[in-house]
Image: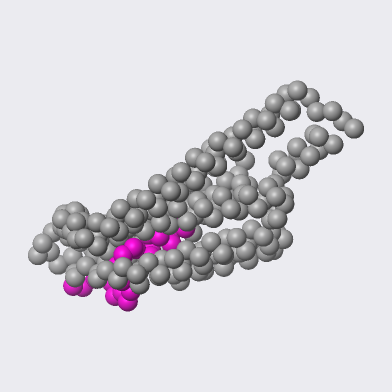
Amino acid sequence: MNQSSPSARAGIMARLGKREIGLPVTLFCVAALILGFGLLADKVMEGGTMGFDTRVAHFFRPPGAAGPIGPDWLHEMARDVTSLGSMVVLCFLIAAVAGYLLLIRKQGAAVLVVGSILGGTVISFGLKLLFNRPRPEIPGGIQVFTASFPSSHAMLSAVTYLTLGALMTRVAAGARLKAYFMGLAVFLTVVVGLSRVYVGVHYATDVLAGWCVGSAWAVLCWVVALQLQRRGQVEKPDHVAGEAGIEA
């Protein structure tokens, strides 16, 4: 049997140490996001956020204005951006990603991606029914049919884009590519949320709450996925196979 070198064993121990530290830190972040959502929800139900929401709404759409600030082309651009968080666009995106994962025989990863999005959708609409906050009363806006709190566009874009960004970091080579994919995921999440306030269909606190619970759900799903992967219940990670080869 081949004996692993001291440097190889040190590398394995370092990775194990990072896992032991990383998991509690990650779960702490999830707990902090959920706590943030809870505090926001409590203030919203008490009416304590209306002053803040009104100031933000007036910044994007001054009182008496026929539409949001900016030229007409910016208004149309905002409508295009906000559609990136719609159920139709996200469903097309998830179907394409799941189809690709199935084609390369990553059935476990496909199930996890689809499951995380479906779970996030159920949570989003469940919270809307629970809080049942009315939408902002702004004439001439986009037609909507559900309650306002939390923003499902903000939440589901966070779930979808952050999950896909994390998935891409698993296959990207190099820190710059990993940072690029996660940065792009965060950027898309942020601009979709901001567009919901700009077009006047959500209060700012709706979007903040959507970001909190959506990010928490995305991180929690990814933690579960990594734990299942390390146990060999999804696809076996490359570094585990490498470690097995070292220890053989």
Residue 147, percent from left and from top: 31, 71
* Left or right: 92, with 34 as reference point: right
* Left or right: 124, with 245 as reference point: left
* Of 235 and 179, the residue lying toward us: 235
Residue 88 figure quarter: bottom left
Which quadrant holds the N terminus? top right
Residue 46, percent from left and from top: 21, 60
Q: Give the range drawn in magenta.
A: 139-159
Q: Identify the colour scheme used.
A: one colour
Which quadrant holds the C terminus? top right
Provide the major secondary structure of the magenta segment. Answer: loop
What residue is drawn where x is 12% and y is 64%? 65
* Of 222 and 71, the residue lying toward us: 222
Let me know if residue 32 is in the magenta part. Answer: no
What residue is drawn where x is 43% and y is 57%? 214
* Of 14 and 94, the residue lying toward us: 14
Let me know if residue 150 is in the magenta part. Answer: yes
Q: Can residue 147 be seen in this view?
A: yes
- Extreme residue toward the left, this view: 64
Q: Is residue 117 above or below residue 28?
A: below
What residue is drawn where x is 50% and y is 51%? 219
* Left or right: 178, with 6 as reference point: left
What residue is drawn where x is 61% and y is 46%? 170
Residue 210 figure quarter: bottom left
Q: Can residue 179 be seen in this view?
A: no
* Of 180 and 77, the residue lying toward us: 180
- Extreme residue toward the right, this view: 1
Residue 62, percent from left and from top: 13, 59
